[in-house]
Image (tube, helix red, strand yellow):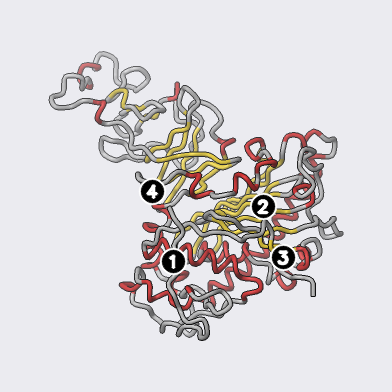
Amino acid sequence: MSETTLPKVSPATPATLPARPVDPATYTEEATYAATRLPVELASTLLPDAYSAAEFFALEQQKVFAASWVAVGLAADVDRHGACIVVDVAGRSVIVTRNRHGQLRAFHNVCRHRATKLLANDAREVGHRGRIRCPYHSWTYDTDGACLGTPLFEGSDVPAGEESIFDTSVAKGFDKADYGLIDVAVDTWGLFLFVNLDPDAAPLSVHLGDLPTRFRDYRLDEWVPQRRLTYDINANYKLVGENFMEYYHLPWVHPELNQVSKFSDHYRWQGPGMYTGMCTTPVSRNTDAGGWDGLQALSTLGPQDADAGRFVWLFPSTALVVLPNHAFVLFNRPVAANRTVETAVLLAHPESLEHAEAEDGIEQLAKFWDLVNRQDIEIVERVQEGIENPAYRGGRMCFRFEEPLHRFQNMVIDKVVGVDRVPGGDEDTMTRMFPDP
């Protein structure tokens, strides 16, 4: 992938916002997004249909989620042979597991016989002896996806004495080697599992850009999940993400968070890659309302990382927060144009869990994050209500706060119109949002 310059527009005058409704036939046309393609100081937001129209949602599932590396879970959840998770990507069910050699494998959750869904959504093990068995006709697969039998007699409940009836080894024109499970690309970075439904996908490293370097000293592959919560949000996943990317709303939505995440301490923190990022430093101490403290910090961090909070939105739908003593992740699964199912995970490094008061610290952090997240959900649901009003045609970007939103929205546009681009980054490692006068 190479960086592509955005279409040229007049630097002096914002583009005219399209009227509502927008013809869905124009969703894949560059001209539809002229107002958002402008430089951020002149740009308008992504068209409202992108958050409310079923037709745009269907297009986005195909062009964004079925064609991107999507973070779907934690590597810690698939830590041995036969352990698995079942995830939904672009409306398609995918099994992620490890084979007998410990290698990650992923497959479409579809039997090669008559398309039965093999594993239930809550499955955590593929099955007895690491076998994936279809509940319909007992076709069975191993954790490399190979078809083992149709069905296997052992453990497949074939009535005694009737094995020969079910023996398909003599079937004409049938070779079980041709009927293995359908592969899905899978990879890891740090604590994350990623899948990509595109059989011609570029490597995950292209998607991540410089993030592995930026997070190198955090040893993210060692962090362990401590708490999980699921939230059902009546809002588009992009509204969840855009809310995460900016701190413009902090004083009014998060009075508690605003005390420990000061405006003056915010930096843009973005390099090349499919992500948006910001940083806060120094890390503020707790107030009576809570905050980032609660666990001991990782001792091996350098001076910059030891006093900073990193906030990254991994395109298309995952939030990652890393502080010196804990991490917080939001996996967002779009269900409809106006509905998102979000799984929040609080993680810590084993070193931070060795201290006597670690359990109390985890509990305090979990309560603080739940408070902040519920405040965010309440406000983004109100945004969803407003954005569905036909009178709203789009809004003006606030350049001081919303450059990450502009970056993200243009990633979405790129995917929808077919531009193959990985955004570049700031020349400086960190760009202060509020320069000293």
Name the residue carrying label 3: 432
Which comes sooner in the sequence, label 3 or label 4?
4
Residue at image point 48% right, 44% down:
204
Residue at image point 40% right, 52% down:
67
Q: CA distance from mark 3 to mark 2?
A: 19 Å
Q: Contact (CB < 8 A) between labels 3 and 2?
A: no
Q: Amino acid at mark 4?
A: Arg
SS for dot 2: strand
Name the residue carrying label 4: 92
Which comes sooner in the sequence, label 4 or label 2?
4
Quadrant housing residue 152: top left
Q: CA distance from mark 4 to mark 1?
A: 22 Å
In the image, 155 versus 268, the foreground residue is 268
Residue most extreme to the front: 427
Mark in the foreground, 3 or 1: 3
SS for dot 4: strand
Q: Residues within 10 Å of mark 4 (few under 14, many from 20)?
A: few
Q: Residues within 10 Å of mark 2 (few under 14, many from 20)?
A: some
Q: Position of residue 371 (x, y in %)?
A: 72, 59
Q: Is 342 rendered above or below residue 160?
A: below
Q: Is 182 rendered above or below residue 345?
A: above
Classify residue 333 as left or right of residue 343: left
Classify residue 181 as left or right of residue 290: left
Q: Amino acid at mark 1?
A: Ile
Name the residue carrying label 1: 413
Residue at image point 69% right, 63% down:
431
